[in-house]
Structure formats: C-alpha cells, structure tokens
C-alpha cells in the first residue's frame, strides 16, 4: 500500500543521525501548502504516530491526520471507535515494502 498526498509520500524518510531543525519561521519561508508539506515530509516534524510491521525491522514516522485524509482504512484505525490512541500503530498483515 503506497499512500500519497499531493504526489508526496506522507511518511517521513528514514534518516540517519539527528534531524535537521526547521528554520524559523518555516511556515513563512515556504510559499504555499505544498512546500509546507514537503518541509514536514523531509524533516519529520510534528509526526504523531510510528507505524511498525511486527516481524520486520522497518518502521515509519507519520502524521495521523495525513494518513486519515488519504485512506478510509487509516481513518478508521486512527480515529474510529476502536482507533489506536497510542504512539505506535502495528500493521501485522502488511509488508513494509508495500509502503
């Protein structure tokens, strides 16, 4: 399953080493919503859920609201009556390669 928003993968890229802090005020430096999403994507700021795949070492940090915007399945998993309220969402039946 590949989830995209404005032709951007909404998961943060796995990074080695410390994350680069966004320049202040980053919202004013980015000229439009697409550039702001790119800034969040490349920096990983404000992520609020980690998607894990039990049995695999891969995990992704993501933004709950962006996941819910792009998929009714993620909306249900994250915000539905039995939605995950924790910081981790375990996807047992998915292969991380699909992301």
Image (cartoon, rainbow, N blue to C red):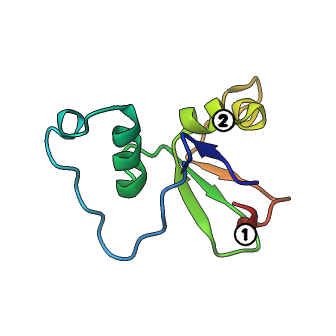
- Vertical order, 33 against 44 (above or below): above
Q: Residue at point 63% right, 71% down?
A: 58
Residue found at the very far left of the displayed protein: 24
- Name the image quarter holding the C terminus: bottom right
Depth check: 85 or 13 in front? 13
Name the residue carrying label 1.
Answer: 97
Depth check: 39 or 74 in front? 39
Q: Residue at point 30% right, 64% down?
A: 19
| Percent position of residue 57, x then y | 65, 75
Are the residues at dot 1 and dot 2 in contact (C-beta closer than 8 Å)? no
Name the residue carrying label 2.
Answer: 70
Q: How many marks?
A: 2
The answer to whether 73 appears left or right of 3 in the picture is: right
| Percent position of residue 42, x then y | 38, 57
Q: Describe the element under mark 1 as helix, strand or loop.
A: helix
Sequence-earlier tag: 1 or 2: 2
The crowding category of the residue bearing disc 2, from other C-alpha atoms within 10 Å (few below 14, some 14 to 19, many at least 20), is some
- Vertical order, 69 against 88 (above or below): above
The answer to whether 36 appears left or right of 14 in the picture is: left
Depth check: 1 or 80 in front? 1
Q: Describe the element under mark 2 as helix, strand or loop.
A: helix
Residue found at the very far right of the displayed protein: 93
């Amino acid at each position: 399953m590949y989830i995209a928003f404005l032709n951007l993968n909404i998961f943060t890229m796995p990074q080695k080493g410390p994350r680069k802090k966004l320049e202040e005020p980053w919202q004013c430096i980015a000229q439009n919503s697409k550039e702001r999403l790119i800034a969040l994507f490349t920096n990983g700021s404000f992520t609020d859920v980690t998607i894990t795949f039990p049995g695999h070492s891969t995990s992704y940090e993501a933004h709950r609201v962006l996941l819910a915007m792009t998929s009714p399945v993620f909306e249900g998993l994250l915000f539905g009556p039995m939605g995950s309220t924790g910081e981790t969402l375990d996807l047992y039946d998915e292969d991380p390669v699909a992301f």
